[in-house]
């Protein structure tokens, strides 16, 4: 499968007076054409900073300090980490689009939908205002906004959260992205609206064939939507693979703990739920050795607190796991 995004050894940190926050600490992941990858993990594990790093949208004083973010463009793969501003803008405009948890924060309160989505289109394509407006009306219809000819002249504050998220998705689609990054796109919405937005994302994905990176802390959403899943803990991917493999037979103790903390997917089982023991440590107090060791049920003293595990692949299944239990070479 052709790769649309390849993240390798990505590091992003925030240098603060209190210390250095290692928000992203060596992330490796790839997304193939048309693939849906869910990125899961508890809050604070670096999912959002990783996603923003891909588009070079990290807030100050955040800085990418290492690694590569290779994106397929018309001229081959471009590395966003070292790309010039023109290439970065071109990737944001035509290759990768992003939607956020809070659509309001990503939209201007001062402009109508027609004006802001139309401007986004005109930034990257030589179309007239009238053409852009017609495109916006078409897009609003495609994302299921009723009466798009009227809504096009509304301001964000006139819309409900769900409608605004649809408008945000319309704006993201306006550039025909090859990859859509959706960062907790339904977390701020009520359950019914959540389901509608997920359905919309899935049908748009199928219709356009774009790849999707869906960031969610909800394992049910990941199971329902994704082909593959990457589990993040403290700035690294600790396990990845096809969603059926990872959820049916998790290998990493963190993945196992996450799965025990939610109702069995689809079974309605009454097995007692156990939250993951302890808390995510703050990213400027990253434990030595395996970052998960203070919370791990399978902790091996003298090993897990000393050496950081490297990703191990196989045997017999795609994907990798970073845990010393799976490293043959450990003594
Ligand atoms: N602007 C920022 N300044 C300082 N620290 C930040 C900033 N944004 C995120 N962080 C820190 O980076 C880590 C990862 O955060 P984030 O990517 O938002 O996690 P997630 O999306 O998985 O909940 C957290 O420890 C968070 O506190
Ligand atoms: S390396 Fe050790 S502490 Fe880390 S997840 Fe594996 S068993 Fe647990
Ligand atoms: Mg986040």
Image (cartoon, rainbow, N blue to C red):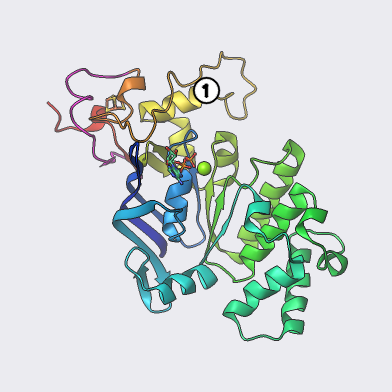
Please tell me whether residue 95 is drawn above or below residue 316 in the rendered image.
below
Residue drawn at 18 percent across, 31 percent down: 307
Residue 314 placed where, x, y %? 29, 40
Residue drawn at 31 percent across, 59 percent down: 68
Residue 93 placed where, x, y %? 53, 71
Q: Secondary structure at mark 1?
A: loop
* Horizontal side of residue 108 vs 271, given as left or right: right
Please tell me whether residue 69 is drawn above or below residue 37 in the rendered image.
below
Residue 264 placed where, x, y %? 57, 25
| Crowdedness near tag 1: few (<14), some (14–19) or many (≥20) residues, C-alpha within 10 Å | some
Which quarter of the image is occupied by the N terminus? bottom left
Give 231 or 103, whichever is nearer the viewer: 103
Residue 323 placed where, x, y %? 28, 31
Q: Is residue 311 magenta?
A: yes
Which quarter of the image is occupied by the C terminus? top left
Please tell me whether residue 326 is drawn above or below residue 93 in the rendered image.
above
Give the number of callouts.
1
- Residue 73 shows up from this direction: no
Give 226 or 109, whichever is nearer the viewer: 109
Give 101 or 261, whichever is nearer the viewer: 101
Q: Which residues are magenta?
A: 298-319
Residue drawn at 48 percent across, 74 percent down: 90
Q: Ligand 1 sits in which quadrant? A: top left
Looking at the image, the residue that sits furthest to the front is 17
- Residue 59 shows up from this direction: yes
In the figure, residue 129 lies in which quadrant? Answer: bottom right
Residue drawn at 36 percent across, 21 percent down: 295
Give 107 or 67, whichever is nearer the viewer: 107
Q: Is residue 8 magenta?
A: no
Q: Main secondary structure of the magenta part?
A: loop
Identify the residue position indicated by label 1 in the image: 261
């Amino acid at each position: 499968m052709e790769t649309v995004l390849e993240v390798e050894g990505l590091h992003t940190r925030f240098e603060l007076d209190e210390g250095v926050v290692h928000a992203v600490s060596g992330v490796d992941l790839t997304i193939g054409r048309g693939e849906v990858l869910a990125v899961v993990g508890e809050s604070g594990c670096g999912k959002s900073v990783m996603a923003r790093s891909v588009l070079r949208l990290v807030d100050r004083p955040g800085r990418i300090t290492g690694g590569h973010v290779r994106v397929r463009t018309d001229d081959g793969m471009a590395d966003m980490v070292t790309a010039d501003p023109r290439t970065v803008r071109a990737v944001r405009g035509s290759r990768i689009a992003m939607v956020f948890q809070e659509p309001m924060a990503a939209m201007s309160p001062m402009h109508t939908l027609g004006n802001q989505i139309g401007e986004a289109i005109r930034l990257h394509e030589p179309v007239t205002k009238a053409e852009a407006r017609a495109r916006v009306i078409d897009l609003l219809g495609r994302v299921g906004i009723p009466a798009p000819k009227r809504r096009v002249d509304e301001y964000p504050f006139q819309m409900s959260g769900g409608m605004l998220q649809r408008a945000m998705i319309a704006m993201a689609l306006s550039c025909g992205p090859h990859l859509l990054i959706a960062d907790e796109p339904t977390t701020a919405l009520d359950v019914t609206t959540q389901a509608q937005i997920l359905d919309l994302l899935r049908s748009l994905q199928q219709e356009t064939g774009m790849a999707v990176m869906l960031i969610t802390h909800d394992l049910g959403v990941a199971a329902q939507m994704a082909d593959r899943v990457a589990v993040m803990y403290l700035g690294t991917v600790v396990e990845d693979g096809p969603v059926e493999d990872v959820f049916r037979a998790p290998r990493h103790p963190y993945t196992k703990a996450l799965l025990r903390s939610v109702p069995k997917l689809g079974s309605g089982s009454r097995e007692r739920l156990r939250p993951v023991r302890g808390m995510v440590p703050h990213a400027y107090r990253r434990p030595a050795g395996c970052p998960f060791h203070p919370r791990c049920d399978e902790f091996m003293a003298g090993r897990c607190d000393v050496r950081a595990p490297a990703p191990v692949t196989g045997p017999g299944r795609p994907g990798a796991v970073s845990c010393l239990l799976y490293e043959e070479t450990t003594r």
